[in-house]
Amino acid sequence: MNTFDTHEVSNTVAPFENVNLYAADPALQEALLREGGAAAAESLHALGAELGRAETLDLARLANLHTPKLHNFDRGGQRIDEVEFHPAWHALMTLLIENGAAASPWSGQPGAQVARAARYMLFGQLENGSQCPVTMTYASVPALKLAPKIAAKWLPKILSSQYDPRSLPVEQKCGAIIGMGMTEKQGGSDVRANTTRAEPLLPSDARALFGDEGEDVYRIVGHKWFFSAPQSDAHLILAQTDDGGSAGLSCFFLPRYLPDGSRNQIRVQRLKDKLGNRSNASSEVEFTGAYGWLIGKPGRGIPTILEMGSHTRLDCVLGSAGTMRAALTHALHHARGRSAFGRPLSEQPLMQNVLADLALESEAATAFGMRLARCFDQGGDPAQALLGRILTPAGKYWICKRGPAFGAEAMEVIGGSGYVEDGPLARLYRELPVNSIWEGSGNVMCLDLLRAFGKTPAAREALAAELALAGESDADYVRTTQALLADLSQPQSDEFGARVLAERVVLAVQAGLLLRHAPSYVSSAFVASRLAREPGGAFGRLPSGVDCAAILARALVE
């Protein structure tokens, strides 16, 4: 050593990089094959290698370090509302779009949703902010098909494999991305409280302005408190209408540029300063007489937008599963290379317990997400459609809710070095809460699950058929599923216990999948730790009979 060197650097671990993310994940590979996506295995192997390269992984760091910048005006004072991104963001978007993360499920190929789900989970291990506009673009397709003229013009650009970030009318672009804006200041999840209004143009005025495209055009005035990806080429929004007696929320398509090439009256007020998802631009906007085209029927905006919402909720499940997988791999890689008290961390019994538990949670989330994707692939089968109807809100609640605690535990495996921004764990931890909040918070999902069981009794039978596939060899599984199905045979009106119900549904499905498809040492450990006793880890699981009013009065005395 040099005379003035204070110490040798030792017992540190090289970053988790230059590894094939797909090849390193047996659970994902097996799920792809059994759920119907085998045709994509070769392309996923190539994608896993690309996403695991050090240079690719560093794009995530750069895109989150150099966050989007809003420019409301150009140098001459003209209103432009442009968002500037670092080149790393555009590189990430190019990877996603070119690899089919938005368009591939709509190819009509068997297993396309499952294959895309695997891609999305791999991208979830890389960077989550860029997944947001890609999810909305992917999910917009079913809703836009309700407006054939808009679909004819826009779907070829939405389904393009080219990412085109230029701010131009869609006719001049190689590809397009779609955003959405639902919530307002006064309502949040209660979109029926929205105050943004849409007034129909007279057909003669609409034709004079927009020619052949002047059909079902409305003038929109109001705001959106969360307007995702304002750089998108168009957005789907909800606004109140009172059109020929069809009062209520309607769904509208707002292009960034109007057919005559002028900018639509969408004013970006500011970008949100978010906890995570920092590479992605989320904004507040005002509509100062923006033009929007009706999607679906007047007053039927919520059912129309749910054509989009079910797919975005699927992606919340897949994105959380991918991010948890990323946190696990970084933690396990560190534990294998780091020694303490005379042996590697990964060989310490208590650390093994922690890591194995994280591994069980990650594999179960992967199995569930891929099974749910098959429901979307087979949506023409009534039983699969019903199963997807209940597993989507239940999975979005439970898997997304498990994410933040999972990320914190993985960070703790690495210790102080995991808590600082030099590595990826802090960023991954900040990303994990967003999927639980976006596209319907936990309570909204659990109430939706109750609604599904209450309105469609056959949903219980679809769940029962899925659970029965695991057989009766495991006593704890049999006891759990019998109790769950017995409770579901009763009227579903217990809002107070809805979180517990969602948790039970997901854990039962996960256990059944692992009992059928995973090695016995995985499935038996999962059942013993999640079914034989309650796993814990989520808030809002109080039993009936608790005096909540008294607790809340004591909690805040004013």
Image (cartoon, rainbow, N blue to C red):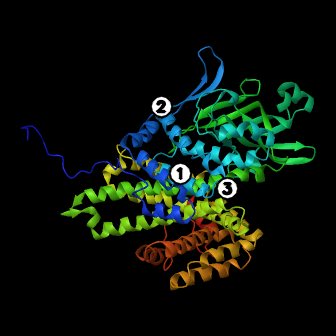
> Label 2: which residue?
87
Which amino acid, by three-letter code, is at mark 3?
Answer: Ser
Pick out the residue farthest to the top: 76
Against 370, residue 232 (above or below) is above
Q: Quadrant of residue 462?
A: bottom right
Residue 293 location, x and y as percent? 80, 37
At numbered mark 1, what does the secondary structure look like: helix, strand or loop? Answer: helix
Q: Is disc 2 in contact with disc 3, using a CB cutoff of under 8 Å? A: no
The residue lying at 67 percent from left, 42 percent from top is 180
Other-residue count near label 1 (Cα within 10 Å), few / some / many at <14 / 14–19 / ≥20? many
Horizontal arrangement in the rendering, residue 155 relative to residue 417 (left or right): right
Amino acid type of the residue tagged 1 in the rendering: Tyr
Q: Earlier in the sequence, mark 2 or mark 3?
A: 2
Residue reaching furthest to the left: 3
Residue pointed to by mark 1: 120
Looking at the image, is mark 1 or mark 2 earlier in the sequence? 2
Q: Nearer the viewer, residue 235 or 437?
A: 235
Q: Is residue 491 visible?
A: yes
